[in-house]
Image: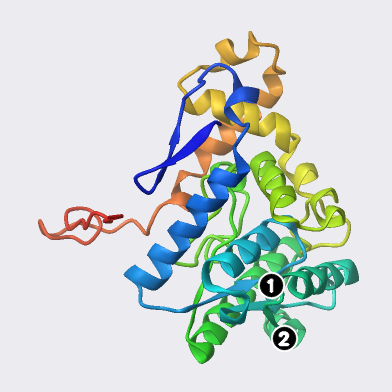
């Protein structure tokens, strides 16, 4: 993706049938735009001076925190480390490394008691269910701590995972402002290196860290670079046969297509039964003004 800053937007020259070219970004221009976006959305439109991020030790939250530090100043950014007993110690260390390097405020709040208190009271809890509870407890803490500090929660969900539905609903995609939502995972890695995120964080296997030994690519069934290329071609209108004809594995193409088509509900607001011509979100729409 080649880009330039113009009238407050990053203009993209489309390269619909060359995914490698399309996924290449100008990290300096993208950084400038995302910092502008955060200032407009958080300060101008919502009246907050501070941002708060759940800093997991992964690359996405590290990039979001780095952008917030540039947009609001490190003193106006809170990074929350929210470990569970099942979390990897490395995640906590990496989150601390990012916070220290950026000079932002950092706090650590254990979520084990809250999560296990609930899990102990229900039957048949599985690793998947416990992981979803952990993600949603973290979002509860993020919003509550944001309220206590007068800081707006900032989202960390990237485009690849949003398109594949690979996130917990009402967790990392819930905050009202998300600077990363239009960046594929491979673009996040490139932007992270530009922003100076420590290489050990950028290059480690991506994981939601909700289960021991879990990795994102293992769950998804395809690598992020392949998923990003296939998603780009799907979004530019190619069908599965056309994508496979470009050398992509047909099974991986079908997997990506199925995940994309089957998770649209996770990318939308709750579906409202319309009873009037003023239904919020269906008829009553307020365009966002980026002037």
Residue at 37% x, 49% y: name it.
8
The picture quadrant where one finds residue 272 is bottom left
Q: What secondary structure is found at the residue carrying circle 2?
A: loop
Seen in the picture, residue 205 relative to 211 is either above or below; the reply is above
The picture quadrant where one finds residue 49 is bottom left
Q: Which residue, given by chain and number where applicable, does mark 2 sit on?
A: 109
Image coordinates of residue 144 in percent, x first then y, are 53, 85
Nearer to me, 212 or 157: 157
Quarter of the picture holding the C terminus? bottom left
Residue at 84% x, 49% y: name it.
205
Image coordinates of residue 226 in percent, x first then y, are 71, 29
Nearer to me, 238 or 145: 145
Nearer to me, 119 or 105: 105
Seen in the picture, residue 13 relative to 94 is either above or below; the reply is above
Dot placed on the residue nearer the N-terminal end, 2 or 1: 2
**How far is disc 2 from disc 1 in space, using C-alphas?**
13 Å
Image coordinates of residue 171 in percent, x first then y, are 57, 66
Residue lying farthest to the left in this orientation: 277
Quarter of the picture holding the N terminus? top right
């Amino acid at each position: 993706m080649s880009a330039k800053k113009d009238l407050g937007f990053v203009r993209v020259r489309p390269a619909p049938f060359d995914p490698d070219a399309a996924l290449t970004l100008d990290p300096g221009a993208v950084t400038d735009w995302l910092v502008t976006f955060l200032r407009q959305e958080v300060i101008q439109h919502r009246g907050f001076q501070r941002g708060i991020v759940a800093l997991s030790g992964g690359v996405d939250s590290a990039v979001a925190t780095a952008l917030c530090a540039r947009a609001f100043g490190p003193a106006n950014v809170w990074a929350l480390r929210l470990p569970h007993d099942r979390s990897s110690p490395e995640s906590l260390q990496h989150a601390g490394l990012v916070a220290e390097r950026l000079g932002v405020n950092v706090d650590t709040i254990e979520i084990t008691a809250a999560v296990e208190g609930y899990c102990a009271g229900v039957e048949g809890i599985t690793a998947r269910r416990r992981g979803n509870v952990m993600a949603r407890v973290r979002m509860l803490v993020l919003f509550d701590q944001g309220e206590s500090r007068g800081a707006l929660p900032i989202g960390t969900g990237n485009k690849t995972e949003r398109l594949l539905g690979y996130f917990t609903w009402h967790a990392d995609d819930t905050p009202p402002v998300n600077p990363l939502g239009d960046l594929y995972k491979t673009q996040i890695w490139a932007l992270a290196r530009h922003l100076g995120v420590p290489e050990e964080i950028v290059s480690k296997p991506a994981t939601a860290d909700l289960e021991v030994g879990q990795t994102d690519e293992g769950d998804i069934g395809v690598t992020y670079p392949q998923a990003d290329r296939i998603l780009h071609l799907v979004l530019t209108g190619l069908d599965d046969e056309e994508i496979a004809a470009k050398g992509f594995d047909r099974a991986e193409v079908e997997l990506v297509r199925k995940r994309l088509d089957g998770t649209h509900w996770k990318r939308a607001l709750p579906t409202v039964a319309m009873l009037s011509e003023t239904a919020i979100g269906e008829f009553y729409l307020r365009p966002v003004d980026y002037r």
